[in-house]
Image (tube, grey):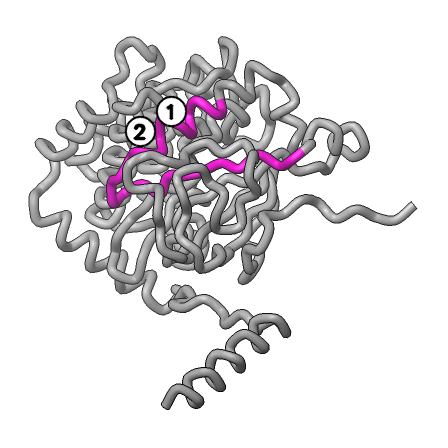
Amino acid sequence: MGVTRPWRLPRWTEVRELHQGRCGRIALAWPPPEPVRDDGTAAGLPAGAGVVGAGVAGADHRPARLAVVRYVPARPLIHRPRQAAFRADVGRLAGLRVPEAAVPYRFVEAPWFRAAYGRSVVAVGGALVSDAVEGVTLARLLERHGALSGPAATVVFRCVLRALAAAHAHETAHGDLRAGKVMVGADGAVTVTGFGLAALTTGAPELRAPELWKGTGIPTHQADVYAAACLLYLCLTGRPPYPLPQLFSLMARHTTAPVPLAGIPGPLRRPLAAGLTKDPELRPRALALLAETERTVSPDWEERGRSELGALTAPMVEPLPRTPPRTPRTPAQTIRRTGLVRLNQQSV
């Protein structure tokens, strides 16, 4: 019996693989040059494919541009309620446009993915497509340079909160916020990626809110804010608020330990403490915490922070391809083009 390759978006040109994790393989890819029609049948999408996000404002008739394609495993999508929640999130996010968030604009279900999963547990359930973001992850930045200054950490925190507030306004949670899903550009711009997966993941334990340890583990808006505050602490200190390897001890610290404020700059202590509040009912929403941060932090920190982030990130950024690769002509295309040239010459 031959080995069957996992399903891929037909006619898309893969540039390189970016990551392979629990929520699927991620690749940088170019779509075919045709504009996307409302029914999703162009740009390499087969007619009749399960397409979520096509036909929304700003998503149809897209020119070919570099995209990040996440091939979602079939395993979580086999569970029908989870698949329904995932599709609903992607549908709500498809109309979201904010600079601080890279949201998926389309999900294409792999044909016959249920039957494929019956034959192989590595089967692909579909492709989640979003625009590519140039930059490096916050995780790489911290690994290279260590803790950030107060202004630089504040810029990251504010941008993350803006992205979360926009998603929450669309009735979706991120659910898996972590340093690897925050991109920092050469100009200091910060973009949150990884939206649309809340129904398929439980999030990183080191950033998991107390209520998720105690309850069902279903991501919420309040849990996103807690994770954002953990990221702020990570930026300021170079480590998570409770750096423990044992899962049970980590759960105990997140649910009962006081908020660690030693070494935190004065203007950021109140926002950090508010974001790490144990009781989700007392924890502020993303928009309220953003306003609190703007009240307590000096206005000039924004410009200073972006400048510092850009200076740290610029040497690390690998530029994204600007144009798609040229597609070789098929013999039929070559014959047609040659015939047209001869016809034009005869008419002259």
Which disc is residue 136 wearing? none
Label 1 vs 2, first from the N-terminus: 2
Q: Position of residue 258 (x, y in %)?
A: 36, 19
The one of 208 and 23 positioned closer to us in this rendering: 23
Q: Is residue 140 above or below residue 22?
A: below
- Look at label 2 and name its amino acid: Ala
The one of 343 and 115 positioned closer to us in this rendering: 343
Q: Which type of secondary structure does the marked residue at label 1 adopt? A: loop
How many residues crowd around disc 2 within 10 Å: few (fewer than 14), some, or many (20 or more)? many
Quarter of the image where the N terminus is located: top right
Residues at marks 1 and 2 touching, judged by CB atoms closer than 8 Å:
yes
Q: Is residue 191 left or right of residue 269?
A: right
Q: Quadrant of residue 219?
A: top left
Q: Residue at x 29, y 34 (%)?
A: 96
Q: Position of residue 80 (x, y in %)?
A: 60, 16
Q: Residue at x 43, y 89 (%)?
A: 345
Q: Is residue 57 magenta?
A: no
Q: Is residue 129 left or right of residue 185?
A: right
Q: Is residue 149 above or below residue 290?
A: below
The one of 98 and 214 positioned closer to us in this rendering: 98
Badge count: 2
Q: Which residues are magenta?
A: 86-111
Q: Is residue 114 above or below residue 55?
A: above
Residue that badge 2 annotates: 167
**Residue 59 visible in the picture:** yes
The one of 242 and 15 positioned closer to us in this rendering: 15
Residue that badge 1 annotates: 173
Most extreme residue toward the front is: 347
- Look at label 1 and name its amino acid: Ala
